[in-house]
Image (tube, helix red, strand yellow):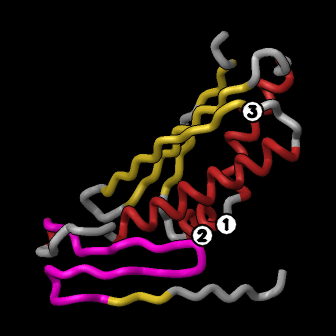
Amino acid sequence: MANQKLSLNTVWYGNAKGNGIIKSENFQTQIAIPVSKGGSGEGVEPKKLLMSSAAACYLMTLTYMLEQNRIPVSGLSMNTEGNTAPNGQLSITHRPHIVLKKSEATNQDVSMAETLMRNAEENCQIGQLLVKADVQITIEGHVSLEAE
């Protein structure tokens, strides 16, 4: 794989109680130091940025894998939760919910969707970087058929 260059532009306004903006192509968000650390809290804090990167990577990887395996998906959503232990250890739990088209999905599709849901984290580059940094990532998802 060739080197990939990514660029961000970050600007900070004010002191620790101020806030900033991170921008890149197709991306912009306001950032701030959390209130608990003496900041304004008027923006995304670093841990949430990290978690959002892990969640986006996992969900995009899962979406790609489902499509490549021609799984008839009608909906895909996910909740992600992070926890920092007293020793500073971060853990992330993704809870994806895959909804399959009832009129098209077979039992094999359900089984494959469950397998892909478990395996997507192994193919997510951001998640694997975090695992190497001793972040525990857990998948607690489920697959269902759409309601009639």
Q: Percent from the top left, x then y, of residue 12? A: 29, 88
Q: Is residue 118 left or right of residue 85?
A: right
Q: Split into 4 quadrants, where in the image is the C terminus?
A: top right
Mark nearest the camera among 3 and 2 is 3
Q: Residue at x 86, y 23 (%)?
A: 108
Q: Percent from the top left, x then y, of residue 117? A: 69, 40
Front-most of residues 135 and 72: 72
Q: Is residue 65 left or right of residue 139?
A: right
How many residues crowd around disc 3 within 10 Å: few (fewer than 14), some, or many (20 or more)? many
Separation of marks 3 and 2 at Cα, in angstroms: 28 Å
Residue corresponding to mark 2 = 129
Query: SS class of the residue under badge 1?
Result: helix
Tell me which segment is drawn in magenta. Answer: 12-35
How many residues crowd around disc 2 within 10 Å: few (fewer than 14), some, or many (20 or more)? few
Query: SS class of the residue under badge 2?
Result: helix
Was residue 22 drawn as part of the magenta stretch in this picture?
A: yes
Was residue 44 drawn as part of the magenta stretch in this picture?
A: no
Q: Percent from the top left, x then y, of residue 14? A: 18, 89
Q: Are marks 2 and 1 in contact (CB under 8 Å)?
A: yes
Residue 28 vs 78, above or below: the answer is below
**Label drawn at residue 125:** 1
